[in-house]
Image (cartoon, grey):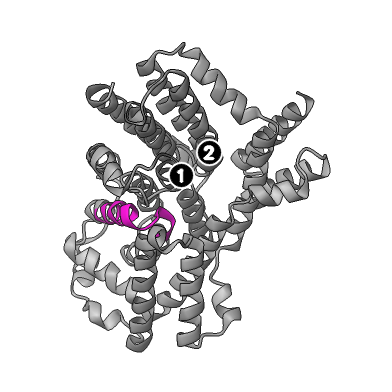
Amino acid sequence: MGQSLIALTIFLGTYALIISEKLHRAIAALLGGTLLIILGIVSQEKAIHHIDWNTLGLLIGMMIIVGITKKTGVFQYLAVKAVKWAKGEPVYILIALATVTAFLSAFLDNVTTVLLIVPVTFTITDRLGINPIPFLISQVLASNIGGTATLIGDPPNIMIGSQTHLDFLDFLKNLTPVVAIIHIATMFLFYLIYRKDFNVSAELKKKLLDLNEIDEIKDFALLKKSLFVLGLVILGFILHGALGLESATIALFGAALLLTISRDEPEEVLLTVEWPSIFFFLGLFIVVGGLVETGVIDRVARWSLEATKGNFTLTGMLILWLSAIASAFVDNIPFVATMIPLIQKMGALAGMTPQALEPLWWALSLGACLGGNGTIIGASANVIVAGLAEKNGYPISFMGFMKIAFPLMLVSIVISMIYLLLFYF
């Protein structure tokens, strides 16, 4: 019990430092993680075991690919196209970019999607002379919403699918309808919040609409190479299950291949990697690993399932809400990893068939994936966007993000609850 208390104290202390912004979040997470090892709560070997190297490898690989692709001018090209499509109206550009983010996140992972969309966003907002933060927040939310729709969009879904033998079509059929409704509702609320916030002169709009997007491409040869590698990587992500390869391997191979054929200097390219975000994840995985090792997460999950006293509907709703609130503050990967065997055990004790348990898997997926929208550290995509925003001179504060995102996350969970009650419970 003593070790559980220390692990919980370090976890809460780390989050207090992150929220207060007295220390950079990467330093706070590394401080918490190393403190757990120094105090003997988690051994160094076990700490390393809790780091999700697949996530880190995926991030680094995709950051290298995006860093090289950026030089071609393709993001500026897409920015001009988006401005023309939306006739220069910022709020429609916001909705268009967020919708593209949600769609791509269903078929790529959501981190890869934001790495591709965020550079386009900065180009547009710089040219329009407006604040990019509302655009970035909408893209964070859209990436996590879109990622919920399919088996490959978000890590919790991959974990649930591999443990329950639910396939791509199962996720598509059961989760895509509600995800589409949630995205439309979220975009409508963004429209209401920001429709009067952007002031762009008619003269500037005309100037942007007169631009020729083809002129933005600076290096056609490098663009062909970048798009070839990006296409190969996307195909790899879609087929990774059949190939028996993790997404990190595919992303790092793509990065190595693009470095080889582009002949770019590795030192220069590696500077484009968002290293503070990488080290933030590294520290946070260890801090959450401390809660796993000392049984804190396990006890919370067991207590929550026992509290429902076998009521199936109540259990489903509790899984949905507990997953959502927990995933807003802790990484959803260890939480989902703990919940999967507990749900399976509960089903076995109740003599339920795998088909009868399915509604609980949809509740877990919706809660864990959508709950990540609650705070700036709730999901991988959130942290990456915050890091890129800071690098471009637009830091997003913990409370500034939460003020907008947390209520919208609650709206998405309420819609999910109504959907589950209507069709599954």
| Residue on which disc 2 sits | 337
Residue at disc 2, secondary structure: helix
| Residue 109 lies in the magenta-colored region | yes
Question: The residue tagged with tag 1: helix, strand or loop?
Answer: helix
| In the image, residue 355 lies in the stretch drawn in magenta | no
Residue 275, quarter of picture: bottom right
Mark 1 crowdedness (10 Å alpha carbons): few <14, some 14-19, many ≥20: some
396 with respect to 93 (left or right) = right
Residue in the image at 28% along x and 39% along y = 175
Q: Residue at x 61, y 24 (%)?
A: 299
Query: Does residue 210 appear left or right of residue 267 in this picture?
Result: left
User: Mark 1 — residue?
Assistant: 159
Identify the mark nearer the N-term, 1 or 2. 1
Residue at 41% across / 64% down in the picture?
243
Pinpoint residue 236: horizontal percent, then vertical percent: 39, 66
**Dot 2 alpha-carbon crowd within 10 angstroms: few under 14, some 14 to 19, many 20 or more:** some
Residue drawn at (62%, 42%), measured in percent from left and top?
A: 18
Q: Quote the CA–CA distance across marks 1 and 2.
A: 7 Å
Who is closer to the viewer here, 246 or 137? 246
The picture quadrant where one finds residue 80 is bottom left
Tell me if residue 336 can be seen: yes
Q: Is there any visible trace of residue 283 in the rendered image?
A: no
What's the magenta region?
96-112
Q: x and y percent of residue 379 in the render?
A: 48, 45
Residue type, numbered disc 1: Met
Query: Do the CB atoms of the residues marked 1 and 2 lie less than 8 Å apart?
Result: yes
Q: Position of residue 339 (x, y in %)?
A: 50, 31
Q: Residue furthest right?
A: 39
- Image location of residue 110, percent across then percent down: 40, 53
